[in-house]
Image (cartoon, coloured by chain):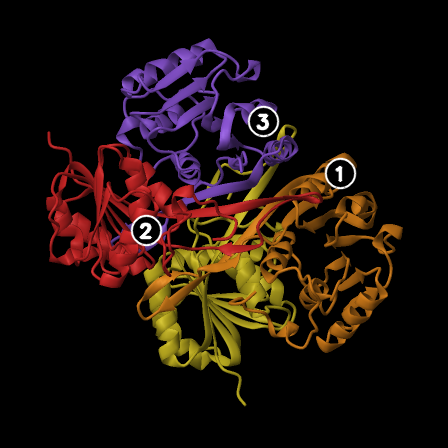
Chain colours: A purple, B red, C orange, D yellow
């Protein structure tokens, strides 16, 4: 993550082992149009970085509810929301999302956990028409399984992406890309619930 | 741009020839923490896509003022803000930014035009402390000239990036990245005005 | 393939629809140390470009035998070897490689066809100890199936790669990478038959 | 260099600090058609890895002469040629190539040193018609200066490239690219002396 820039928002937050990178968060919010007023469910919270990133975009009128089954992680995430000043807009729910999504009429559901395909059907029900479902997983098999399940369940506009980011170094003796760095983070899949006609 | 997803925001907007890509807009807003309340100046507006993207993120309490020296482009950009429902938050100013920036205490200035380096000094004055200046240019020489000028003027945390995005195709017979596509858009440079101590 | 350079060798050869790219041929020969004297089997020949590329490297003391089950392709490949002046070193065999490999003590077997995994066991028998087996396939599933079969059969040092190549454009007004181009060709897997102790 | 495969040729060679990577060597030889009989000049030798790679391809009828101005490096390179069994085909010359190229009618000249542009004119004279000149440099400015000098001197088909290579990891729980790795090595420029009509 060296050479990458983080918004001040994350400065005081405590970092867990596996955080979705800012370049991937950026594509997720930009492609799905996240802005003030969005109603979002996120799982699993982990340390809460994606939840905080999204919470910062949906305030003052929207909300993020982030599910986290592990109570230790949920506690860290909750503390992080306070440190980021977002506790009003982001709620950490210490529960496994597979047990069900309470919220309805959602604009976006983001899934950053191993078996994202298991939450596809319940996500369809929880999204409003025109809402987006996003999966973020490290392997190609997880990506494929998720995308095929989205098709089965009736989602539309299913697209999978891999993002890249390379630092360009400007030295007195010349300009060149960074020599070593991050070559892969995860695969992002977008799926949309059709807008009612 | 095939295979890329665009937020609904852009749906009714009329597209000019050279639009900054959504993957680059995404990194710009994510790295600089754009959210409700941000005060942003943008130049040149072009068709106004970046201005609209940012305007959508800063509403309801922030604003974007986008400078555009060509009156024909300014008219299209202005129309596009109406089509996107953002005319309240994004103002198109039909003027060359090199003549001066009227606004002060800005959180972010985005420059998407050929000679971004010429606006560095005036940007420094217009930004609040902690504010960000961003340049988006197609060539390495433009990137370098801008970054060095930022250093001269006293900006900190100057970093240059190239983003990438690749579609992963899921077919019945197998999974693979897209065969052909966009290999380069532009170089993004971030520079920060030091926070007062 | 625009912007790529091809050796003169290919100049007079007739091109079929799906040719392995020169960037991928390059890695195959470089990683496996192809040079004068190598004994190589290739399948399927297609138009014979990989066979010609390898034939040019193994002459005067080595050989390439390229299997091709379709007689129309085999005829084109044979004509291409003559056009390239390599008919002495590259033999096109109009037969399905899955029926068996006649040659023994091979240094390298290259497989550029859909179900490369089916030829793994017979390749093991045909290679000399220390010899290399290479698969070139478009999808991740094909790559994985091949690599796992190599492991089952007893190959060592199994590695999978994806190559990239980007043209840098030098114009009067600046330097930048090509805008559009080839983003994916195929996955290359290398597997080695252990050297006898 | 982890995860990359090296030909046995390099196994016993002593490695210096800055070696051109095998992926770049591969493109250089493949694009220029290096094979048995090629007459090649290389500079600077460094530890002699590129010289050995090329020497292995041009034997038994061709040769490589590799210029190296530092006597300590020249000694290591010479020892490495013996270790690789290539002393008959690769000659290390302890001299600065800028003092002049003795050889004539060359098929290829490879330049892997800081100021490759200074050797362009003398390379033109030393190459046969149809011969190739190749520069390998880390920065964009070096690449550009070299390419423009090639144009000035009368070379044709000048093309600049950046290569990429990514390992794909196959684990029981899934398939994905390597997480971290080499993101940039050098820029390769090819220039050709026109074939006489």
Discs 1/3, front: 3
| Residue D27 at x, y percent in the picture | 54, 61
Q: CA distance from mark 2 to mark 1?
A: 56 Å
Q: Which residue is mark 2?
A: B80
Within the image, what quadrant is residue A115 found in?
top right
Outermost residue on the top side: it is A71
Q: Which residue is mark 1?
A: C149
Crowding near the residue tagged with mark 2, few <14, some 14–19, many ≥20 C-alpha atoms within 10 Å: many
Badge 1 element:
helix
Give me the residue at 35% from left, 79% from top: D152
Visible residue check, residue D139: yes
Disc sitting over residue B133 in the figure: none
Q: Which residue is mark 3?
A: A120
Q: CA distance from mark 1 to mark 3?
A: 33 Å
Give me the residue at 34% from left, 48% from top: B83
Q: Is residue A140 above or below residue D144?
A: above
């Amino acid at each position: 993550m060296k050479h990458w820039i983080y918004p001040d928002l994350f400065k005081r937050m405590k970092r867990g082992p596996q955080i979705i990178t800012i370049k991937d968060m950026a594509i997720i919010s930009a492609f799905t149009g996240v802005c003030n007023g969005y109603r979002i469910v996120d799982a699993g919270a982990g340390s809460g970085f994606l939840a905080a990133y999204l919470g910062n975009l949906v305030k003052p009128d929207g909300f993020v509810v982030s599910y986290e089954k592990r109570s230790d992680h949920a506690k860290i995430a909750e503390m992080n929301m306070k440190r980021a000043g977002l506790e009003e807009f982001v709620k950490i729910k210490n529960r496994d999302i597979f047990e069900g999504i309470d919220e309805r009429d959602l604009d976006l559901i983001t899934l950053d956990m191993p078996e994202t395909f298991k939450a596809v059907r319940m996500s369809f029900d929880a999204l409003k028409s025109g809402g987006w479902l996003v999966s973020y997983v490290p392997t190609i098999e997880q990506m494929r399984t998720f995308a095929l399940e989205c098709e089965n369940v009736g989602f539309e506009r299913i697209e999978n992406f891999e993002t890249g980011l390379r630092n360009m170094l400007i030295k007195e003796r010349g300009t060149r890309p960074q020599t070593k760095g991050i070559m892969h983070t995860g695969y992002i899949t977008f799926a949309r619930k059709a807008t009612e006609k």
